[in-house]
Amino acid sequence: VCFIPGGLDCSISFISHVLGKVCVHGRQKEILSVLVPRLTDLTKSDCIWQRMCWRLVECVPDRWMEAVVLGFVQMTPRADVLSRLLGNLVVKNKKAQFVVTQKMLLLQYGHTTAVLQNLLGYLSLDGQRRPLLVKVLQELLETWGSSSAVKHSPPEQQQYISKAILMCLSHLKEAEIESCRQELLTSMMEGVKCHLDSSLPQTRRLGMIVAESISSKINTEGPVLKFQYEDDDEARELKSLLVQTPSSCVVSSLPDDDRNEKAEAELPLVLEGNKKSHTAAPVAPDEESDAELDSDDDLIPYDMSEDKELQAKAPVYIRDCIEVLTGSEDLDKWEATVKALESLVRKNPAATREVSVELAKILLHLEEKTCIEGFVELRQRAQVAVLTTDPLPVAKYLTSQFYSLNYSLRQRMDILDVLVLAAQELSYPKSHGKIKRSDDPKPCIQLLSGSDSSKDWRRIVDERIKSKTRRFATGQSQMELASGPNEFNSIAGHFFFPLIQHFDRPLTTFDLLGEDHFVLGRLVHTLAVLMYLAVNTVAAAAMGKALLEFVWALRFHTDAYVRQGLLSSISSVLLSVPTERLLEDMTEELLETQSWLGDVVEKDPDGDCRRMALQNLLLMENLKKKLQTVPS
Amino acid sequence: MALPPPDPQFVLRGTSAAVHALRFSCGGQEPDVPVLFSGSENGLIHVWNLKTRRVDTALDGHGGRSVYCVETMGGKTTLLSQGRDQRICLWDLAEGRTSVTSCVSTESVGFCRCSLFTVARGRWLMAMAAKAPEEVQVLELPSKTSVCTLKPDVGAKLGMPMCLKLWQHNSGSQPLLLAGYEDGSVVLWNLSMGKALSQLVCHQEPVMSLDFDSENAKGISGSSEKVLSIWSLNEQQNLQVYNTHRLVNAGIADVTIRPDKKILATAGWDHRIRIFRWKKLKPLAVLDYHTATVQCVSFSDHRNPGERLLAAGSKDHRISIWSLYTQT
């Protein structure tokens, strides 16, 4: 398409119509890939062409405006090009303004970072458009800070909005920040609260990064908000958005020139000859004559290899350990006891059984007196050792304490972790010889992160599904692993049922269904694992039924982490309970669960939940098929 | 291939309390019996006969309060003992007597061992911690007149004096005092003027014990940390750090240099006695006999070098006697 230059009065509206029609039919790429580069070149220095371009876009009828604007924003390489091509369209045209400020930012979230940069850069480049930038930022912050958005919107959208906020912040000038500083501060505080409340680590991290950025912008001097989070590529990419890189060729003067100078200037390396002479000993002993030394050479040193650092000895008896842990003021001994406790417990099962509940109580309340490395792990291992040595009374004690008053959330979660680890140990076939700690095939639930365990379990479930289907197709081609009696058999119920009993009874300091939904999430995951480990036990069927009812009661919980736990519980039930029992005893629950799973697959905002629900549905299908083909 | 560390020559048992102070008196001629004095936590001073290796007498002069310093005053007929009952007692032990001849009241509640120095026959100077927290008082004995009181500058913040040593350059010159303080510094005092000549910060923790070799103008101090510090005195009477030695375990209760200036011994909180060569502080031996902290070490003053002994008293109520490096 060629335009004839010269003082001709052409009517561009026809072209606009064509452009609009083509774009609305979805052919933005084709036409704009030719048009945009041409126009870029032509408008570089020629004002007339610029005005013609603006006219072109302005004349597009409203019903096609959205497609055209979208196309332009996506196809232009840089923000300043976009500025040249569109001019102040967003100010003049209501539809364009809506598309740019609302639709692309808040309603859609599929655009790339480059497109976002274009958009926001475009808004920042002209004085008339800048108020729109501020407005956009405020709206973005409102969305970012609303707790319902944080809970219900998909993580991809949250990331998109966070990126947009960071870019807006990078474009704003000092004066503008000053004017809306108060609002920035309030929205930041609200937003941070919602984000940190979430159980998913990605959301928390996003919140932290954005809050840090906002705080660094509004408090240029003085202490700045600083969080501790994992600084990986994603975080660095986000933070890099906060700084604007200078664009190479600029037509209109950029007001942000000064801020564009990144601190890239290399610090001048100051190399000093740091070789100072040995001034530590001002009196140089070298001057002593060697002759004097020789006369003393007849003093032959003795063997000093035994001279090592003193270490306190740990007690050898369990009851001594109890004494040291409860009363002793001798911190060296206390440390040595904590380190040696686990092995002592395992070596003396009979002695441990006599004092198991007391030991469990002491360990549950044990606080770090001195700074030992790995104290938390040592304590946990000792607790697991006590629990496996004397499961029944200790499990009773621990599960009752889980629902008691005056424990911290950390302690309650510790109880859950210990129960799971002990269950794992008990259910692992001992015929393999000593329990191999080094190559633990089943992953331990990690102490601190929550959602990682669901990924691991998903992997296990996947493998289990695969193994089941494969065996079904090819018969008994794999050698069965050596199996032993599942020691967890007699105790599974004692671990499981007390935990599931009181979840709906709030205490003054502990409300599972209310604020402490993080603990609820952990509880659900724990129940899933216990169910999974109870495969081939007598209590599995009863546990499965109780667990399905539990899941049904909580299925609409707002916390994504809890829902993930519920879905993994369903997987565990499907895998552990023998299929015949499933269909006989729990048909109704299964049907209800199946319909809920279908719902989750379609409507749940969290990607992980949807995937797990799909897997569960597949599992159910497989089980049905398996039952159908096995001759009754 | 180095030899394993030697065993003690013999071990004295019978104090039934932690041993805090030791002093030999073996310089006498035959038929004088070599004797070891030991001060214990139960307030008794035992006089050990080193030939029979038994207790000859037990002196009870401090009312059951711990005796933490024992010094001989010219042979074994006169003894000085310092106890936690805030008294310094002078004993007359000649001809089998066991009586306290005089007493000095210290009024100090610290643990600083006093230092005794023979000025002339029958006259001594004694430095001890004074009543005021940072002060050191020097008395003349037996007249008990105060020679001077050494007060550190206001704001010096040295803390309590922890250990003292009176010495003189060569006979005829004025005696000087080296004092180790709670803040880890060692100060050299001039007694006649009552002023500090030099101060050196040797340690980060309190100086537990120090000893000085006046011939070589070098001294060593041990602290509650893991470092032994050796410092020297130059012609301008200034203290300078000479060397440091890092130990395996923290805490030194006592340090002493053998009279022939060849070796030194340290008593450690880690139950071990360490022997070093004094010249270059080369470690020679680690004696691991005791089962509790070693509180004091002392070298004997035998005329015959081959008979020289090292005694170490510990909290486990035992005194171990060692014979080391006696050939030179």
Image: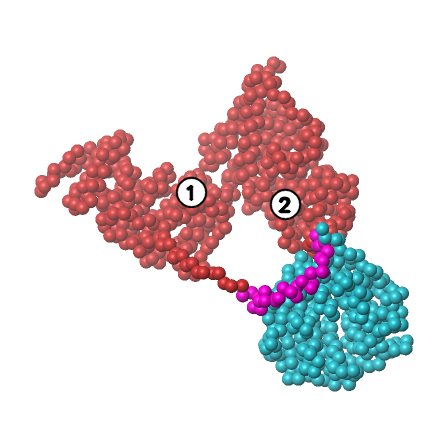
Instruction: Depth check: give the residue in front, B179 or B106.
Output: B179
Q: Are marks 1 and 2 in contact (CB under 8 Å)?
A: no
Q: Give the letter of the cyan chain.
A: B
Horizontally, residue A569 falls left or right of residue A308, namely left
The kind of residue on which mark 1 rests is Gln
- The residue that label 2 is drawn on is A377
**Is A283 inside the magenta-drawn segment?**
yes
Q: Which residue is mark 1?
A: A158
Instruction: Report whether A566 appears left or right of B49.
Output: left
Give the CA distance from mark 1 to mark 2: 35 Å
User: Label 2 amino acid?
Assistant: Glu
Looking at the rendering, which quadrant does residue B65 occupy?
A: bottom right
Residue A206 image label = none
Quick one: B304 or A164, which is closer to the camera? B304
Above or below for A235 versus A569: below
Tell me the residue at 74%/75% (across/down): B114
Highlighted magenta segment, given as a residue range: A279-307
Q: Which secondary structure dominates the residues rendered in magenta?
A: loop
Chosen colour scheme: by chain
Q: Give percent across and percent down for residue A554.
A: 55, 36
**Nearer to us: label 1 or label 2:** 2
Q: Is residue B188 above or below residue A281?
A: below
Q: Colour of chain A?
A: red
Magenta stretch holds residue A40? no
